[in-house]
Amino acid sequence: MSRPVGSRLVRKAVIPAAGFGTRLLPATKAQPKEMLPIVDRPAIQYVVEEALQGELHDILIITGKGKHAIEDHFDRNFELEEELRKSGKTHALAEIRDLTTAGRIHYIRQNELLGLGDAVRYARDHVEAEPFAVLLGDTLLRPSGECLRKLISIHERTGDAVLAVEEVPEDKVDRYGILEVESVEDSEYVVKRIIEKPKREEAPSRLAAVGRYVLIPEIFEIIDGLPPGKNNEIQLTDALHVLATRGRLRACRFSGKRYDVGNRFDYVLTTVEYALDRPDLVGIREALMSILKS
Ligand code: G1P
């Protein structure tokens, strides 16, 4: 299918991962929340793998103070490799080598935590004049990759920015960017308005942004002109709202499952669900069932 004039292939992913992770203290006092393990992989590894599954091999991670462990995780560790080689642990060796070669990972530091919109602004020089995907570092989606591929295909068809949405319960609308939309197709919408963390009575719907976006370079100039929004932060949602008023924002309903690993309750549930899906953890389901029955 031919692309609209001005639209370009999406090749780059941006993963904002600079936040403190206060909802998971004290675990996040000296390590990034994105490095907390879900079974045996840090959460951010699943997000990087999702980007790769969406064919985005150029990845920029927006880090900040205390986030060095993320860079170390995706870097070579020669001593460890040598140790694994000597002890014949070839599977583990292959796994840690794959991590460092699968994509091209770049880093930039957000020096002050001024909000998600501000974090995205740090990607400007890296993405240049290209559309790019944004994947929030503390949100995991399953099935992985499918949502991103859908967003990219909508962008490539329309040239517009696109975000993934799902319906949330009414008592949770104040945790998300909430949308007013017009339906185009079954799971695709034109966005008329988006508002960050509205009160229940102000929410235009229950359709919430789930933390996956394909953005267009026009977003940077919009962010530059934004005053601080909700919680006195520069909100990506406010920039998206400007795109919506220009008729340049679409939404796509995500039909899989979303895991917010940035709070205790969901973090524990995510770990359990991912463990249940691991073929190598033989007997885990039965062990969990017996705990639940006792
Ligand atoms: C961010 C966005 C919000 C979105 C949410 C998804 O909020 O600002 O619009 O709905 O992610 O997780 P945060 O959770 O970082 O406060």
Image: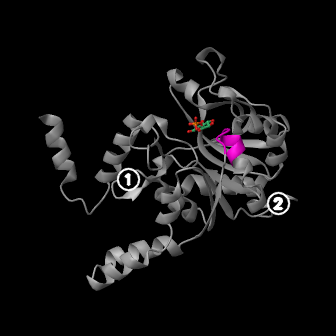
Q: Which of 137 and 54 is in front in this view?
A: 137
Would you place residue 190 above or below residue 274 in this image? above
| In contact (CB < 8 Å): disc 2 and disc 1 | no
> Tag 1: Cα neighbours inside 10 Å, few (<14), some, or many (≥20)?
some
Dot 1: element: strand
Tell me how many marks there are: 2
**Residue placed at 20% from the left, 44% from the top?**
288
Colour option used = one colour
Q: Nearest the camera: 141 or 39?
A: 39
Q: In which quarter of the image is residue 133?
A: bottom right
If the picture is divided into quarters, which one holds ligand 1?
A: top right
Q: Position of residue 20 (x, y in %)?
A: 53, 41
Q: In this view, does 10 lie to the left or right of 165?
A: right
Magenta run includes residue 117: yes
Q: How far apart are marks 2 and 1 (CA)?
A: 35 Å
Which amino acid type is marked by label 2? Ala
**Amino acid on which the number 1 mark rests in the picture:** Pro
Please indicate whether residue 279 sits to the left or right of residue 120 in the image.
Answer: left
Residue 184, above or below 123: above
* In this view, the mark in front (2 or 1): 1
Q: Mark 1 points at which residue?
A: 37
Residue 286 is inside the magenta segment = no
Expressed as whole percent of the image width and height from the top left, the position of residue 153 reads 68, 57
The quadrant in which residue 189 appears is top right
**What residue is at 44 percent from the left and 74 percent from the top?**
77
* Left or right of 143 on screen, residue 130: right
Task: For ligand 1, tell me if the residue under mark 1 lies within 8 Å.
Answer: no
The image's mark for residue 129 is 2
Magenta-drawn segment = 112-119
Residue 38 in percent (x, y) is at 37, 52
Quadrant for the N terminus, please: bottom right
